[in-house]
């Protein structure tokens, strides 16, 4: 009986397409079903919906409606990775660990955070938005770079301060392209254990080992300071080319011996600063969640002090990014938590020391 039952089931299954076809032929003209519109998951430049926002910032799903002093944007891109992938999960991890809750309903003004160690309250009445993630397409560099650049341009057009959640370090170049037309030039301050200044030899020119070389080629970038560099190499060509192009390099050990304040003071004065912070500048015994860790580096407090000193320098901070957060290689979210906290520490320092340079858009 079981065999007969199975045979009957398969006979019915095989007859189904014929029955459907006969039903379609029986339809009168004009009753044919129209084919469904094809769904393009990568049509929109910003991916929505999303769960948490960064430190409870207002969720803004349309940049055209942005009316905030700060705009957080995620760039879940790791196609430029040469070693361990996974930084595409950085933005969601940074948001997940960045607590704080939303502001009171109907009130865009944030009451601020009190820092027990500093004894101060920060970000009072500073309006912050999280505009979501750039909608990254698979296996396609340049269209994704264009989306990143266009998103940054839109944020800047709304007079908001871009705060970027990476992503691998290759995103720096398309982000910097978005600053074309800025008033004054930009000096890039680069925290990293690697130079990321390789020319690529004509082959790989846009991976996460090239972004600072590509960025300094832009006419609106005036210079580059790289801090925290360390490690071993058999080829010093990239370093030597950087020196010839005027790149300031402060290796990690020299930075610690001269002191954080003195190291930051040695960075040239500029009209504008953009800070790109690769989290592998932090000692990997403290921050494991990154793709290319190098022994040595900064502690949380040293990195925090460095960022605070940058905010005091006088030049306008026109944006910053944290890149190479790879939650696949961390335990208990400690790397994401440290990175998110440093991002917030820097935002607090920016609005303490130069809040007048980032007024509420009107």
Image: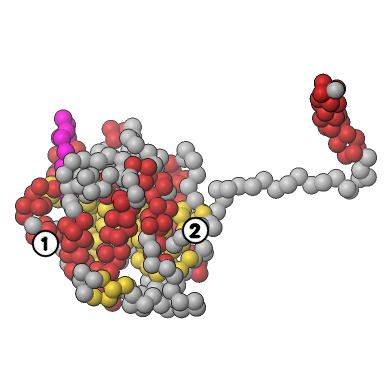
Q: Secondary structure at mark 1?
A: helix
Mark nearer the viewer, 1 or 2: 2
Q: Secondary structure at mark 2?
A: loop
Q: Residue at x 76, y 45 (%)?
A: 35
- Image quadrant containing the C terminus: bottom left
Q: Nearer the viewer, residue 3 or 47?
A: 3
Mark yes or no: residue 54 visible: yes
Please give left or right for residue 114 compared with residue 160 in the image.
left
User: Is 232 a magenta residue?
Assistant: yes
- Residue 170 place in picture, x, y as percent: 34, 45
Q: Residue at x 64, y 47 (%)?
A: 39
In the rendered image, the vertical position of residue 304 relative to residue 58, given as above or below: above
Q: Which mark is residue 261?
A: 1
- Residue 192 place in picture, x, y as percent: 22, 48
Mark yes or no: residue 197 visible: no
User: Would you call the spot at circle 1 few (<14 residues within 10 Å), some (14-19), or many (20 or more)?
Assistant: some
Q: Residue furthest top?
A: 3
Please give left or right for residue 340 compared with residue 5 in the image.
left
Q: Which residue is mark 2?
A: 51
Q: Residue at x 16, y 57 (%)?
A: 302
Please give left or right for residue 162 compared with residue 59 in the image.
left
In the rendered image, the vertical position of residue 353 relative to residue 227, given as above or below: below
Tell me which numbered mark, 1 or 2, is placed earlier along the sequence.
2
- Residue 208 place in picture, x, y as percent: 32, 42
User: Is 97 a magenta residue?
Assistant: no
Q: Disc 1 to disc 2, how far (Cα)?
A: 38 Å
Bounds of the magenta span? 226-237
């Amino acid at each position: 009986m079981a065999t007969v039952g199975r045979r009957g089931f398969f006979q019915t299954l095989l007859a189904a397409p014929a029955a459907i076809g006969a039903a379609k032929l029986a339809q009168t003209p004009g009753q044919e079903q129209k084919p469904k519109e094809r769904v393009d998951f990568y049509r929109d430049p910003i991916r929505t919906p999303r769960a948490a926002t960064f430190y409870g910032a207002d969720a803004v799903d349309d940049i055209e409606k942005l009316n905030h002093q700060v705009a957080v944007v995620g760039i879940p891109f790791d196609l430029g990775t040469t070693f361990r992938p996974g930084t595409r999960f950085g933005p969601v991890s940074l948001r997940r660990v960045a607590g704080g809750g939303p502001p009171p309903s109907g009130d865009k003004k944030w009451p601020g955070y009190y820092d027990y160690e500093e004894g101060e309250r920060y970000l009072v009445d500073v309006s912050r938005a999280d505009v979501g993630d750039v909608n990254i397409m698979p296996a396609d560099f340049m269209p994704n770079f264009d989306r990143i650049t266009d998103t940054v341009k839109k944020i800047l057009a709304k007079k908001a301060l871009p705060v970027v959640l990476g992503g691998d370090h290759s995103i720096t170049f398309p982000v910097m392209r978005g600053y074309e037309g800025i008033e004054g030039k930009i000096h890039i301050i680069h925290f990293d254990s690697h130079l990321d200044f390789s020319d690529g030899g004509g082959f790989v020119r846009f991976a996460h080992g090239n972004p600072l070389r590509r960025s300094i080629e832009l006419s609106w970038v005036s210079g580059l300071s790289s801090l925290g560099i360390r490690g071993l190499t058999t080829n010093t060509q990239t370093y030597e080319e950087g020196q010839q192009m005027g790149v300031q390099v402060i290796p990690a050990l020299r930075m610690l011996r001269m002191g954080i304040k003195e190291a930051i003071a040695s960075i040239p004065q500029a009209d504008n600063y953009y800070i790109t912070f690769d989290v592998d500048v932090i000692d990997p015994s403290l921050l494991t969640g990154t793709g290319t860790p190098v022994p040595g580096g900064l502690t949380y407090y040293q990195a925090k002090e460095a960022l605070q000193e940058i905010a005091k320098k006088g030049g306008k901070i026109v944006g910053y990014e944290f890149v190479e957060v790879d939650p696949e290689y961390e335990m208990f979210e400690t790397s994401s938590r440290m990175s998110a906290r440093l991002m917030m520490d820097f935002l607090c320092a920016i609005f303490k020391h130069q809040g007048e340079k980032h007024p509420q858009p009107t």
